[in-house]
Each structure stands twice: as structure tokens, then as C-alpha cells.
Amino acid sequence: MENNIQQLYQEWLANAGECVAELKAMSADDRKEAFYKDLEFGTAGLRGVIGAGTNRLNVYTIGKVTQGLADYVLAHKKSGATVAISYDSRNFSEEFARYAAAVLAENGIKAYITAELFPTPYLSFMVRKLGCDAGIMITASHNPAKFNGYKVYGADGCQVTDNAAAEIFGYIQKVKTFDVKAKDFDKAVASGSIEFVDVTREYLDAVYERSVGKNRNVSIVYTPLNGTGTKIVPQMFRERGFEKVAVVPEQAEPDGNFPTTPYPNPEKAQALELAIALAKKNNADIVIGTDPDADRIGAAVKTADGYRLITGNEMGVLLIDYIFTHKKNLPAKPVVVKTIVTTDLAARVAEGYGAEVREVLTGFKYIGEVIKKLEQKNEGERFVFGYEESYGYLAGTYVRDKDAVIASMLVAEMAADYLAEGKTLADVLDGIYGKYGKYYHRTVSFTYEGVSGAAKMREVLASVRKNPPTAIDGSKVVENIDYLTQTKLDLPKSDVLSFKAEDGSKLIVRPSGTEPLIKVYITAATGGEARIDAILSEVKKFM
């Protein structure tokens, strides 16, 4: 490996003009981390640390993957191909997006690109609205500032799924990094091979069609966490009649350094600290926060005891219950979709309203696939709601990804409608628990960075497969599913292990598709947080 790393390093020194200073400053360890592998392309595209090297995100790795995507698109459509592109607030996002457009233009593919940053679901909408053959979103979602990423979407507006990703990766592997060519961006714009587009009006109109509530008297504090939400969520609130909205000033403007929070993820309590502080000052009813690419939403609601954070699982349950009790003209055979790591309470609530619940692998692309299959049977209107516990929600079929814009609208409407009924979201949630029972959940991530970390991750997963748990905190495991080898479920193969105990408690173990993490999803059917702690102690023994 060492000889190959040195060879790649010298090749980059000779050819990567934009990175020479950084390359020369690298230590031996830095070189190893930057060149020991290529960034991996999967169903979530690319995600990595910004910097020089094959294992980093830079214009050269962006160029290589874009050339591979161009070859894939042209293999399926010889002429007239188009690709939509947008980007978030991260460092170098605009530069990467424009370079990708220039590479596509060099290949004779027309690129439609936004003139400024917009949310990930907006890109999904662009692909569908403009009838494009693919889409590119430059984003690393909720990751820390040192990361950026490259998501690829199919013609249906959904992130590419396993087979397409594998085919695209095959084309990428054939590309020599420094052979990639790109047109001059400004000249390509002048010639029409790159075109700036804005579909904001159409996108928001599609969001508004899914409106449920009638009340607007609610006080909101909103934070875009220095991301793309600032472009569109405040506009949505204004146009929908929510007049009492305060935006957190320190997090209002796009900033790829995310100076007020090291991890701009609304799943994390720390990310909403400034918003909750402003809510206390304003005596606001609810806090809403969106992540940098505005596909996830976090929230906190005012209670008698202060502001209560609503988890991703809880918000999905609340929205299902709200939509089925407040929305008129629901379809005759409604479908709700959840991922395998999302709370079983969601299924119980949805089924209580007569909905069919479908369960898919982790990743919103699989929820998009359910919508696609329904539409192929002319039953697209049956899809009512889909969500995953990691704070991602979608109502309607206008996009094929989680959408924090529509989620912000629905949460605001839900809060206003329940306030008119004399209830908070916390009151409603407690009522749901009283009716269906309460499940306790915790998601824990174990980090394995670098060369040694990747090897350790493989060892851990192999060990769990070889020696699976036989009990979860004293309750016998009665169901053991390895999604890599199972054949009974109508689901793709996936590196996920699931264990269900006799009392209903669960453990699900999976490597992250975008970060050097193993995620463990813990469900305690009884015993509350103390039981979660006990199960976590057991988990740590095999991590």
C-alpha cells in the first residue's frame, strides 16, 4: 500500500495544480489518509473531508465522478440529455457545482443549475419539473464543516438506488482523474449548454397543496443552522400566513463554517440551543430547525417545564396522527412508509387509522421506490406519508426525498391547530403514548476513522454476525435478521443486523453509508431510559 500511496502522491503533485501547496504541507500520516483509497461512491453518492487526495473531496474527485456520471447518462441517452444541479451552504459547494456543470457541458449534456444555494428536496423537484435524466446535489447534509458531498439523483427525482449506483460506479472507475476536461463555465452559460433556472414558485405551490391546518396563531422561532433553509422556509411561513416568526440571527445567513455549532444536525440538542434561548426570550410556542441542506427538521415545544425536544421518531408519530385526524379527502387505501429502524409505534398509529404500513431499508431512496411502484400501478395518490427516525419526513409525491420545507409547514400548522384546541404537541404525544404504549429509543454511533478504523468496522460487524446476541438485557432474542442474507422479505440486500427480543425490545446494527460510523438503534419496550442504559452497556462490549 505504501508504494501505491507514494505513487499517487507524486502524480497529484505533478498534475493537481490547485492542491500543490496543501500536498507539499502533508505529513506522512496525512498522505496516508488522503491516498489510501478513493472516496467510495454508493447509493448516497460521495461524502468526504474537503482537501487534496483521492480520499478527499476536491475539484479533481468531483470531476472524476461527474465524468463517470456523464458516461452513464450518455450510455442510456445518446443525445438531448440534461442534468439538474444545486448546492448547499458548505465551503466550496458552489465551486464544485459549477465545475460539475462544466464537465457535463464538455460531454454535450445540458446542465440546469441554480444561481444560488437551495435545499436538497428542491433539487429533487427540479429533476422532475424539468424532465432531467439525472440530478446532482452538492451537500454533506448535517455533517461537520470539514465535510462536503455529492448526491446523485435519477430521472424520477429519487437518489439512485443500488443497481444504478453500481453501474455509475463502474463508469467512474474507468475515468483517469487528470484526463477529465471541462468547458469554461461562463462561456458554456453564454452558449446555452449551462442554464440558470429557478423553480421556487412551482416548488412552493406543490408544497402548499399538502397543507392540512387552518389555524396560524402560533409563535415560532426558526433556525436554518446557517444553511439553505434561509432561502425558502421564511418565505413559506410568510406566504402561509404565519406572522409570528423569529429567525435566530447568529444562524440566519449561509456559512459553511457553521460557527455556532460544530455539528449542524437538528438531531443534536446542541444544534438548537440558540433557538431555544431565543424562544425563551420571546416566549415562543415552538422551535423549528432545519439542517444545512434543509431535508431534516428538528423541533422543541414549550411546556410548563420548559422546552421539550421532540425526537425524530416522536415527530413522525405526531405527524401521522395529525394528518389522519385533520386532513380532509384522504385516499381510500392510504399507505404510510417507514424504515426498519423507525419506531414500531408509527405502524401502530397508522394502522389504527386503517392505513397500510410498508417497511423499507434505511435511506429515503427506498421510500421513493415505494412511491414509484405505487405510481406504476396508477395508485400514487395512496401515498400519504413517509419518514425515517433520523428527522426526515415527506407528505405527497412532488419530490422523492425527505423535505424539511414541507415538514416545517406541517409542524407549524399542527402546533397552531392544537393550540387552538388548548393542547401542545407534548400533550398530544403523551395522549398517543397513553393510547398505544410508549417505546423508548436511542441511536448510538461508534466512530471508526481512517485506515485502521475501516478495518475495525469490518471486524466488529463480522464478530456480531459470528456471535449474535441471544438476549437483550435478559429478554430472549426471538428474531434475528441479517439483511445481507435474508430471503423472506421483499427488500434488497443490505449490511444490517436486526435482533428482536421476546418483550419487544430491539437492537439494529448497521454501518453508516456516508460516515465512518457503526450505528446501533436501541428500542426498549419496557423499563424506560434505565433499560436503554442497560442495553447500551451490553452493546459496548462488542463495539
Image (cartoon, rainbow, N blue to C red):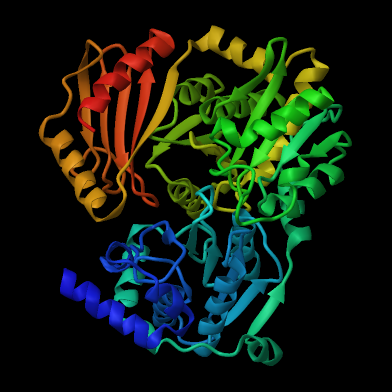
Q: In the rendered view of the protein, which quadrant contains the N terminus?
A: bottom left
Residue 28 percent coordinates (x, y): 27, 66
Give the camera-side residue of 226 and 110: 226
Q: Is residue 120 left or right of residue 29?
A: right
Q: Is residue 288 left or right of residue 350?
A: right
Q: Which residue is painted at 66% across and 45% down in the image?
A: 225
Residue 405 percent coordinates (x, y): 68, 46
Q: Give the tally of numbered discs.
A: 0
Q: Quadrant of residue 29?
A: bottom left
Residue 262 percent coordinates (x, y): 55, 44
Q: Quadrant of residue 446?
A: top left
Give the camera-side residue of 299 and 109: 299
Q: Quadrant of residue 511?
A: top left
Q: Which residue is painted at 68% across and 86% down in the image?
A: 189
Which residue is farthest left? 466
Q: In the rendered view of the protein, which quadrant contains the C terminus?
A: top left
Give the camera-side residue of 197 and 474: 474
381 is higher (above) or lower (below) than 310: below
Q: Which residue is painted at 23% across and 38% down in the image?
A: 488
380 is higher (above) or lower (below) than 358: below
48 is higher (above) or lower (below) than 243: below
Give the camera-side residue of 19 and 92: 19
430 is higher (above) or lower (below) than 398: above
Q: Is residue 127 visible?
A: yes
Q: Is residue 15 left or right of residue 128?
A: left
Residue 407 percent coordinates (x, y): 66, 39
Q: Is residue 407 visible?
A: no
